[in-house]
Amino acid sequence: MTAPTCTLRVTIPTFNTEFVPEQDGGPCPEQAVARLVIEHDGEKCGDGGLCLFDPAEGLELDPWTQTELLCAVHLAEHYQESGELVGATLTEL
């Protein structure tokens, strides 16, 4: 059985975003070390209800659950950016 891989995408940073924006480097190939589950219900996730609205379709959405697998690098970035989210469950694999 193969180990699960990270479900996030690799971002290629730049030194000057005015001239060259960050680029999408494709799917992250690293082995996942944690599972992040976020309950989008309009309150717990901290989105202020925006998670229950689809701007492309202009429709309200039912509460939903987002699951991401994170590699060690993306896990460190998650802690650095958000600290701890209310309504999120982080499980080490």
Image: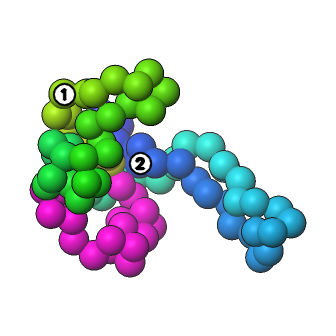
Q: Residue at x 41, y 48 (%)?
A: 6
Is residue 68 shown above or below 62?
A: below
Say which residue label 1 marks: 62
Query: Dot 1: within a 10 Å radius of its alpha carbon, few (fewer than 14), some, or many (20 or more) residues?
Result: few
Give the alpha-carbon distance from disc 2 to disc 1, as whole Å: 26 Å
Which label number is shown at residue 6?
2
Tell me: 1 left or right of 89.
right
Magenta region, residue range: 70-93
Q: Residue at x 38, y 30 (%)?
A: 54
Residue 74 in which image quadrant: bottom left
Q: Nearer the viewer, residue 5 or 87?
A: 87
Q: Earlier in the sequence, mark 2 or mark 1?
A: 2
Q: Would you say residue 63 is visible in this rendering?
A: yes
Which label number is shown at residue 1?
none
Is residue 76 shown above or below 55?
A: below
In the structure shown, which secondary structural element does the residue marked by tag 2 occupy? loop
Amino acid type of the residue that numbered disc 2 sits on in the rendered structure: Cys
Q: Would you say residue 76 is visible in this rendering?
A: no
Amino acid type of the residue that numbered disc 1 sits on in the rendered structure: Asp
Query: Is residue 85 one of those drawn in magenta?
Result: yes
Q: Nearer the viewer, residue 20 or 46?
A: 46
Query: Is residue 75 one of those drawn in magenta?
Result: yes
Q: Name the quarter where the N terminus is drawn.
A: top left
In the structure shown, which secondary structural element does the residue marked by tag 1 occupy? loop
